[in-house]
Image: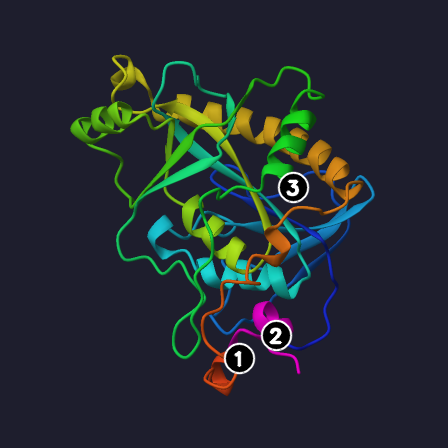
Amino acid sequence: MLSQGEGMEQVKIGIIGGSGLYNMDGLTDVTEVGVDTPFGRPSDNFIIGTLDGQRVAFLARHGRGHKLMPTELPFRANIYAMKLLGVERIISASAVGSLQEQYAPTDIVIPDQFFDRTRGRVSTFFGDGLVAHITFAHPICHHMAETMAAAAARVEGLKLHRGGTYLCMEGPAFSTLAESRLYRQWGMDVIGMTNLQEAKLAREAEICYVTLALVTDYDCWHPDHDAVTVEMVIEYLNKNSVAAQKLIREGARMLAAEPRNCKCGSALRHAIMTSPAAATEEAKQRLSAITGKYFEK
């Protein structure tokens, strides 16, 4: 088990697999790494391997075997561990429901906005002696989103939608009909339970982040919703998993060849409010992986 400050293999691309995507096919030279963080253990051990010549770190968001509910996910540990591994870009795949007719099951959406309907989840590394306020108007790395959209055009049979709003709900129960109808009136596009916290924490950790929202079904607003069976959803999950892995493979290859010129890597430059003299040593040590460069003398 590796912890903060210990030597570990450094990789630049991280992959988070959601429901239905518990492993990454095609990885070679694989090692399994457990990581300890100041925020506890991640959802599972990381699988580090080579994907088309690029070293990547894969994490099953809900743990292998799907053991963790959205409300139980150790979001801070997951993202902080990515930072300790040297990850600069995260590709996050997540099963979602569709709130609009044009997003059909097995389609993939790359949203550019989030709307928070969670309650009481911790979605910041800061507090307890160190304060920061990141800019979050544009929560997805635009450069990564554009690259992944370009990669999708190279994957045969994949239908991708660029842009839209991901509504992040609390769960684990799905929406009531009244809620689903209201979300549609608000103009929301897809609905899920996990990606908002990841996006916020990735921005605080100065890691680029993009969501691949994998549509499994229409939410309960749709007149055909009651005809959806568990078997159908599982079938769509499996199809989405295959499509997502093809897209991730192509996207990771393209990203590895491109310089990182976005602002994500300096998101904390003007965000830390606590003066170096006032910040506690415990807080600086706890967050050294993401704030250390701003407190160097």
Element type at mark 1: helix
Tell me which label, 1 or 3, sits earlier in the chain.
3
In 3D space, how far apart are the residues under numbered discs 2 and 3 (Cα atoms)? 32 Å
Q: Quadrant of the C terminus?
A: bottom right
Q: Which image quadrant for residue 74? A: bottom left
In this picture, is 269 found above or below 215?
below
Position of 289 with respect to 73 (left or right) is right
Three-letter code, disc 2 = Gly
Q: Are marks 1 and 2 in contact (CB under 8 Å)?
A: yes
Query: On the image, numbered disc 3 is attached to which residue?
Result: 24
The percent position of residue 216, horizontal first and vertical second, equals 43, 26
Does 89 sit left or right of 184 as displayed? right
Could you classify mark 3 by the number of other residues whose Cα lies within 10 Å: few (under 14), some (14-19), or many (20 or more)? Answer: many
For label 1, the residue is 284
Amino acid at pointer 1:
Lys
What residue did someone put label 2 on?
292
| Closer mark to the observer between disc 1 and disc 3 | 1
Extent of the magenta region:
286-297
Depth check, mark 2 against mark 3: the one in front is 2
Which residue lies at the image location 41% right of the left edge and 32% below the top edge?
A: 165
Q: Residue at x 57, y 17 (%)?
A: 159
Q: Which image quarter holds the N terminus?
A: bottom right
Q: Can you tell which quarter of the image residue 244 is in?
A: top right
**162 shown above or below 142:** above
Most common secondary structure along the magenta stretch: helix
Q: Is residue 27 above or below residue 68?
A: above
Mark 3 and mark 1 in contact (Cβ < 8 Å)? no
User: Is residue 197 in view from this perspective?
Assistant: yes
First in sequence: mark 1 vs mark 2: 1
